[in-house]
Amino acid sequence: MLDFVFEPKFFIPAIYIAAISLISIIVCCYDKFAAKHIQKHRTRESTLLALSALGGSVAMLLCMLLIRHKTKHKKFMIGIPLIIILQVTLAVALIILI
């Protein structure tokens, strides 16, 4: 019934999204830890946004909301949802074209 999920055109992007989402969560949690304990080893905001743009936006946003990290920064609370909207739009367009 769900055989199409294992076709390379769906399976490979799903593996990529899962991997980049996991990396995004790890980096976000590390930065939250570093913010409290290791000020010298913070993750750059550009890195967090880049991970979002590379496909980890949903995981990054959910993680930030769950651990209350960067939630007062407009750059993240507006930027990441905009990235999600753009990614969903592109994904729908690609699905329609395929």
Image (tube, rainbow, N blue to C red):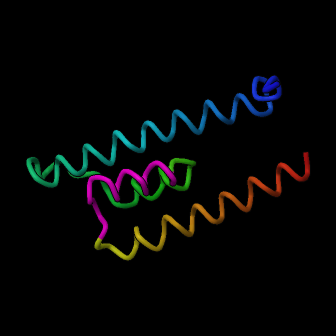
> From the viewer's perspective, is 36 left or right of 94?
left
Quarter of the figure with the C terminus: top right
> From the viewer's perspective, is 63 left or right of 67?
right
**Rendered residue at 32%/48% (across/down):** 28
The residue furthest front is 1
> From the viewer's perspective, is 63 left or right of 4?
left
Q: Position of residue 82 (x, y in %)?
A: 56, 69
The residue furthest left is 37
Asked if the stretch drawn in magenta spans residue 90, the answer is no
Q: Position of residue 81 (x, y in %)?
A: 52, 67
Task: Establish if 48 lies above or below 25.
Answer: below
> From the viewer's perspective, is 44 left or right of 7?
left
Q: Position of residue 48 (x, y in %)?
A: 40, 54
Task: Establish if 98 lies above or below 7.
Answer: below
**Rendered residue at 44%/36% (across/down):** 22
Q: Position of residue 30 (x, y in %)?
A: 25, 43
**Rendered residue at 82%/57% (across/down):** 93
Residues shaded magenta: 57-71
Task: Establish if 64 lies above or below 4.
Answer: below
